[in-house]
Image (cartoon, grey):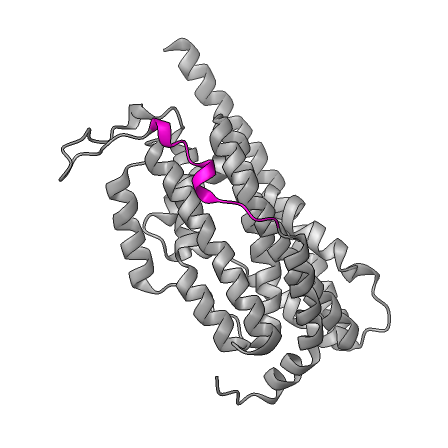
């Protein structure tokens, strides 16, 4: 990779020893697992098509439409791995410690897609034809976030990996299917270790240049969007997921932003310059805004669900 930005060179060099240490720590903490052991193959049977099997029908799975949407979004996010691999490699390096981490991360993320797709097909949880068409459309569009520079990648990945972990874990818990819950809990364990890698890189960067890092973190947090933005039907699925409580503004605030910023001790840092102080003030204001919006959303959701329940009772 040809590197032209002096800032990129600086952060690659400064953070590479930490990247090496964290990669070794990750390899020591990660536990080998096998996707095929988490897929309920005994439930599987041939689909229609060349094998003349049974067509998919919604009633073949007890999952609600919202949980089906959550599973589709989770899988298509994992399927978009080639785009993420390219983006991270382009902004960091495919050599040395950075390359070692990139390839290990890629192998682990690819395992997630294999396991989730195996579950969805064997359990007939979603329409396989619609799923494949959505995969082709999503990957064909090449829609993937492209943070700028090493700090941009590290900051975005720290938020995104935690958000992905939470989304997988909540999808499993709310699915009502112990097999799905077990699988997504296992995937979430990997995502948590990935988040720790990027979070600890950020921690080292904060120690080196807190003003610059807080400015980048502030821009990342305020501009953050879940990686499914380019998926077909994403807005509809995201709304269903939010109403179901899988991932909404309250979850984003309470389970992603607050824990990450608290771990990095963003609001306890001393010795910041004017740029760092301004960035921290913007972060605090953004947290307050998200918290207020989340409260309004939860209230409106409760009201809407109560109305729906009353209508169902009198129908």
Q: Note whether 148 is above or below 314 in the view shown.
A: below
Residue found 59% across the figure and 39% down from its top: 296
Residue range (magenta): 31-43
Q: Quadrant of the C terminus?
A: top left
* Residue 284 position in % (x across, y down): 72, 58
Position of 260 compared to 134: left or right?
A: right
Res 125 visible: no
Position of 250 compared to 142: left or right?
A: right
Residue found 21% across the figure and 34% down from its top: 47
Spot the residue most to the top.
314
Residue 270 sits in quarter: bottom right
* Residue 107 position in % (x across, y down): 48, 59
Residue found 51% across the figure and 21% down from its top: 306
Residue found 31% across the figure and 52% down from its top: 135
Position of 127 compared to 7: left or right?
A: left
* Magenta-colored stretch includes residue 166: no
Position of 285 compared to 268: left or right?
A: left
* Residue 292 position in % (x across, y down): 64, 45
């Amino acid at each position: 990779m040809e590197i032209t930005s002096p800032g990129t060179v600086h952060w690659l060099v400064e953070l590479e020893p930490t990247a090496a240490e964290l990669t070794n720590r990750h390899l020591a903490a990660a536990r080998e697992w096998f996707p095929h052991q988490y897929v309920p193959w005994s439930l599987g049977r041939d689909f229609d098509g060349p094998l003349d099997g049974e067509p998919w029908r919604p009633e073949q799975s007890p999952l609600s439409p919202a949980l089906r949407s959550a599973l589709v979004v989770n899988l298509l996010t994992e399927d978009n791995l080639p785009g993420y691999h390219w983006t991270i490699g382009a902004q960091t390096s495919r050599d040395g410690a950075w390359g070692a981490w990139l390839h290990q991360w890629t192998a682990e993320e690819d395992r997630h897609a294999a396991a989730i797709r195996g579950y969805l097909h064997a359990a007939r949880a979603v329409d396989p034809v619609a799923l494949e068409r959505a995969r082709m459309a999503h990957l064909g569009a090449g829609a993937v976030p492209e943070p700028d520079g090493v700090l941009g990648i590290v900051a975005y990945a720290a938020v995104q990996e935690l958000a992905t972990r939470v989304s997988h874990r909540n999808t499993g818990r709310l699915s009502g299917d112990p097999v799905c819950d077990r699988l997504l809990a296992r995937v979430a364990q990997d995502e948590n270790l990935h988040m720790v890698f990027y979070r600890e890189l950020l921690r080292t960067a904060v120690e080196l240049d807190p003003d610059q890092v807080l400015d980048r973190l502030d821009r990342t947090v305020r501009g953050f969007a879940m990686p499914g933005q380019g998926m077909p039907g994403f807005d509809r699925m995201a709304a269903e997921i939010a109403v179901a409580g899988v991932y909404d503004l309250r979850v984003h605030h309470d389970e992603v932003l607050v824990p990450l910023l608290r771990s990095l001790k963003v609001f306890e840092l001393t010795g910041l310059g004017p740029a760092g102080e301004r960035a921290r003030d913007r972060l605090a204001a953004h947290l307050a805004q998200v918290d207020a919006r989340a409260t309004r959303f939860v209230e409106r959701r409760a009201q809407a669900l109560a109305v729906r329940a009353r209508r169902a009772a009198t129908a």
